[in-house]
Amino acid sequence: MGSATRLVVGLGNPGPRFAGTRHNLGRMVVEELARSRGERFTVHRRTNTELAELPPLVPGSGGKTILALLRCPMNGSGTPTQALARFFSVEPRNLVAVHDELDLELGEARLDVGGGDHGHKGLRSISAALSKSGGEKKYARLRVGIGRPPGRQAPADFVLKPFNSKERAELPLAIDEAIRLLEDF
């Protein structure tokens, strides 16, 4: 990857109503990465996003890392992500979307390049926006587990609920694992 700029987008829904919900786990990971590096987010007016800039995650690897929090609903993640990629001249291969994943248990995280959206509307929006701009959909996805809903609860309801007390106790380990994968990438 050399000295290319990397863009790490934490997917979630903005605002206090969604803070602490399972669907905002990607956003939480990116917020914690910035906090752990002593960085603060500032508003990037041109793309209506919140950004923090990090030096290389791995010393000596070159390039900077832009952390982004979108200020739009999850399902509209594509347009601002594509605008950021264009503004910072980030190739899809240097883009990482961090998001919640139903098919992984809390505490599990996986980093994959390319692949489908698995029903995740934030990823679907990003893939569609990148395709429309002539780009490819082969960007990295850091999938951070939230587990499956209990019983017959609808996944859409489950992801918008806050973590329960047991899950909140496990959350720091899950976030740390996701950050470790980002640093290794």
Image (cartoon, grey):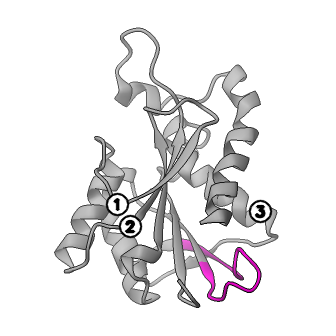
Q: CA distance from mark 2 to mark 1?
A: 5 Å
Image point (37%, 75%), residue name: 92
Q: Is residue 178 above or below residue 20?
A: below
Residue count near mark 3 (Cα–Cα under 10 Å), binned few <14, some 14–19, many ≥20: few
**Number of numbered discs:** 3
Q: Is residue 99 above or below residue 53?
A: above
Among numbered discs 3 and 1, the one appearing first in the sequence: 3
Part of the protein shown in magenta: 50-65
Instruction: Please tell me whether residue 72 belongs to the stretch shown in magenta.
Output: no
* Element under disc 1: loop
Q: Nearer the viewer, mark 3 or mark 1?
A: 1
In x, y percent, where is residue 169? 76, 29
Q: CA distance from mark 3 to mark 1?
A: 28 Å
**Picture disc at residue 139:** 2
Q: Nearer the viewer, residue 158 or 130?
A: 130
Q: Is residue 76 left or right of 64 when viewed as pictured? A: left
* Disc 3: which residue: 35
